[in-house]
Image: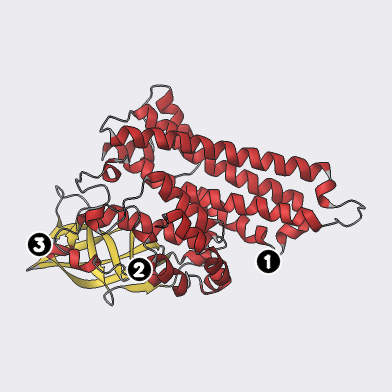
Amino acid sequence: MSTPVEKAESLQALVREHADISESQRHLASEVAKAFAAEGLYRIAAPADSFGSEADPLTQVETIEAIAVADGSAAWNLMIGIESFGLIAPGFERCRDLIEDPMVVMCSSTAAVGRADEVEGGYRVSGQWQFVSGCHNSQIFGATVRIWRDGVMVEDIPNRYAIVTLPDWEIVDTWYTGGLCGSGSHDVRLDDVFVPEERLIAPIGGTRHESPLLNFPLGARLAYNKVGVAWGLARAGIDAFIDLAEGKIPRFSGRGLKDRPRAQRAVAEAEVRFRSGRALVVELLEQMWTTVQAREHITSRERGLFQLACSDSVRGCIEAVNIVAEAAGTSANMQSHPLERIQRDIRVVGQHITVAPHNIEDAGRLLLGLPANEMMLAGLERS
């Protein structure tokens, strides 16, 4: 039986074939999304009793990486789909029928908090949520909400997910970006939609479960999948430069690009920056996974080190792509060359809150024995 990584590699040609279509229409081509679902890739991070295949964390990351080598937007879409299903599906105890079909894809958003007014038999839900990657290819939307009763928000009940099925949610066309525009991270809006009581479930990280995946630190889990997108893009960028250097003779030069010391140093620096950051994340991820499987405690220091590794690895991937793009000259600016899109896409990865550079400083606070300040190491850890 093929592994998730092998399945992802087998889809690279399909992903490349549809990358321009996804880019131009600003959401993932349906043929690619259906292929991901048919191969079970969206469900690799969910426990077996939640219709998932329960792949270990490194397998999840490397599966996303394999798709990102072919197209960053497709990988981002898959990554969010994996994350959403893996963290939300275990809460479907009373509405499991919604996800029994393996072709059902889920999208979600925590970027906004909507309103769920309590009524007989359920809730009336309204709101608009941003950054709903993959919404065009999904049949289920998980909307982060707070419960309201008799016109007053219920303070002692934290966020919940309201599970909504098509056609009860509307896509708002908002995703006009330079990078990762094929991810389809548009807004989703609900206007006074009735949600049955059994479809209001726990938020991400809020379901108790015996699976080690559900007991892996939430902040670390949110970070490591983003890293997979950056790894694949960096690998694709470096390889694209190597291919370019093989045949390009720069203007006003009698030597090929690969014979120039500047190009040789660029590819060397890019490789070591990418590979060293990747190796540290893999090392720490495997250590944490062993600890979680043994039901042992992961310390704040260990969480800080892992967050540091993830944020720095993404930063290193961006640097690696920038290094080879600079050495590529004007070729990297041409839309016909892979480096042009890769540069735009990888920059967006580094801007995501889960792997953004400010997390490096916060990790340093933990290493110095100070309390963390930012969401990834403070807010999520407390929750």
Q: Is residue 110 visible?
A: no
Q: Secondary structure at mark 3?
A: loop
| Way the structure is coloured | secondary structure
Which disc, if any, is residue 188? Answer: 2
Q: Give the CA separation, mark 3 to mark 2.
A: 26 Å
Query: Which quadrant of the figure has residue 101?
Result: bottom left
- Residue drawn at x 36%, y 46% as measured from the top left: 56
**Tag 3 and tag 1, C-beta contact below 8 Å:** no
Q: Residues within 10 Å of mark 3 (few under 14, many from 20)?
A: few
Which disc, if any, is residue 150? Answer: 3
- Residue drawn at x 42%, y 57% as measured from the top left: 2
Q: Residues within 10 Å of mark 1 (few under 14, many from 20)?
A: few
Q: Which residue is mark 1?
A: 335
**Rendering coords of residue 238 (x, y %):** 66, 50
Between 275 and 308, the residue placed more toward the observer is 275
First in sequence: mark 3 or mark 1? 3
First in sequence: mark 3 or mark 2? 3
**Rendering coords of residue 229 (x, y %):** 50, 52
Which is more foreground, mark 3 or mark 1?
1
Q: Secondary structure at mark 1?
A: loop
The amino acid beneath tag 3 is Asp
Left or right: 138 in relation to 317: left
Q: Residues within 10 Å of mark 2 (few under 14, many from 20)?
A: many
Which is more foreground, mark 3 or mark 2?
2
Between 293 and 26, the residue placed more toward the observer is 293
